[in-house]
Amino acid sequence: MQGLFPLVRTVQEVVHFYRRRNQPEVTFMALFYDPKDERDLARVKAILDKAGIEYFLRREPTAGIGPMQVNVAEEDIPLAEKLLRKEELKKEPLRE
């Protein structure tokens, strides 16, 4: 047993190892951003693409609000928000 599983000492640990290893990875996606138009959508997509953050687009439930809703994995929301805020600060003129 030690040769096959150097870090595992008991049968229970072997079973736990295989159960954990064979579990499918589940990612929960959440609404991240609701762009106002196509240009805003393209800007947000570019920011997420550049950072390597996966996302999917969902059609608006109500026509006329915006083109698509941007959804990202729950664990990526803090980073995505930070990047979006950083981009917004670049656009704002300095106040004196």
Image (tube, rainbow, N blue to C red):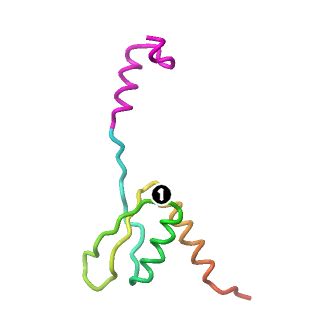
Q: Say if 81 sits above or below 60 in the image.
A: above
Q: Magenta region: which residues?
A: 1-23
The residue drawn where x is 44% and y is 77% is 42
Instruction: State the image coordinates of residue 22 (x, y, percent, origin top left).
Output: 34, 33
Q: Nearer the viewer, residue 74 or 46?
A: 46
The residue drawn where x is 40% and y is 25% is 17
Instruction: State the image coordinates of residue 83 (x, y, percent, origin top left).
Output: 56, 67
Would you say residue 90 sits in the magenta stretch? no
Count of numbered tags: 1
Say few, some or many: other residues with alpha carbon within 10 Å of mark 1 (under 14 / 14 to 19 / 20 or more).
some
Residue 59 is drawn in which quadrant?
bottom left
Instruction: State the image coordinates of residue 71 (x, y, percent, origin top left).
Output: 38, 65
Q: Amino acid at mark 1?
A: Asp
Q: Is residue 95 left or right of residue 54?
A: right
Q: Say if 17 sits above or below 45 in the image.
A: above
Q: Nearer the viewer, residue 5 or 35?
A: 5
Q: Is residue 66 left or right of residue 95?
A: left
**Residue bearing the label numbered 1:** 76
The residue drawn where x is 39% and y is 82% is 38
Q: Say if 87 sits above or below 39 in the image.
A: above
SS for callout 1: helix
Q: Nearer the viewer, residue 2 or 66?
A: 2
Instruction: State the image coordinates of residue 51 (x, y, percent, origin top left).
Output: 53, 62
Q: Nearer the viewer, residue 53 or 66?
A: 53
The residue drawn where x is 38% and y is 24% is 16
The C terminus lies in which quarter of the figure? bottom right
Q: Say if 80 sits above or below 93 in the image.
A: above
